Image (spheres, rainbow, N blue to C red):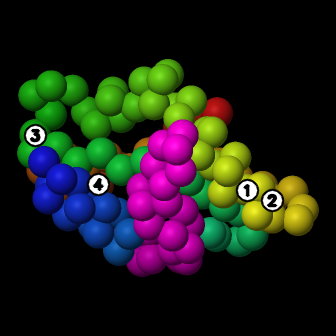
Amino acid sequence: MKFIGDIGESQAALYLRLHGYRILKRNFRTRQGEIDIIAQKKGELIFVEVKKRKNDSFGGGSAAVNTAKQQRIIKTAESFLSNYEKEVPCRFDVIEINANKITHIKNAFM
């Protein structure tokens, strides 16, 4: 499973780069949780959760980003942001990869 996730994260990072995002970090971890990709575009920080599925038989990948997962991602993002001296605009996105079709859901939660 981790192998599939790693492939998905690499696909998502490439997708983001091709769309003008700069990748700052991958797999940022704290005790609260992990953020798959932290990117930046036009001064905004984007915290990205990547979900890869072989197919959508069990629902799209974004369905796995439930409230508990969102809270862990937000706490982890707060830890990352504590290194910044000033407020930085940010958002939380989800990138779904189903059978190599990429769907980028901007502002997926907050």
Of 96 and 7, which appears nearest the observer? Answer: 7
Q: CA distance from mark 3 to mark 1?
A: 34 Å
Q: Residues within 10 Å of mark 4 (few under 14, many from 20)?
A: some
Camera-side mark, 3 or 1: 1
Magenta stretch, residue numbers: 15-39
Q: CA distance from mark 3 to mark 2?
A: 36 Å
Q: CA distance from mark 2 to mark 4?
A: 27 Å
Q: Image quarter for residue 85?
A: bottom right
Q: CA distance from mark 2 to mark 1?
A: 8 Å
Of 3 and 30, which appears nearest the observer? Answer: 30
Q: Are the residues tagged 2 and 1 within 8 Å (C-beta)?
A: yes
Q: Name the residue that disc number 2 marks.
A: 88
Mark 1: amino acid: Leu
Camera-side mark, 2 or 1: 1
Q: Name the residue that disc number 4 marks.
A: 102
Q: Name the residue that disc number 1 marks.
A: 81
**Mark 2 vs mark 1: which is more N-terminal?**
1
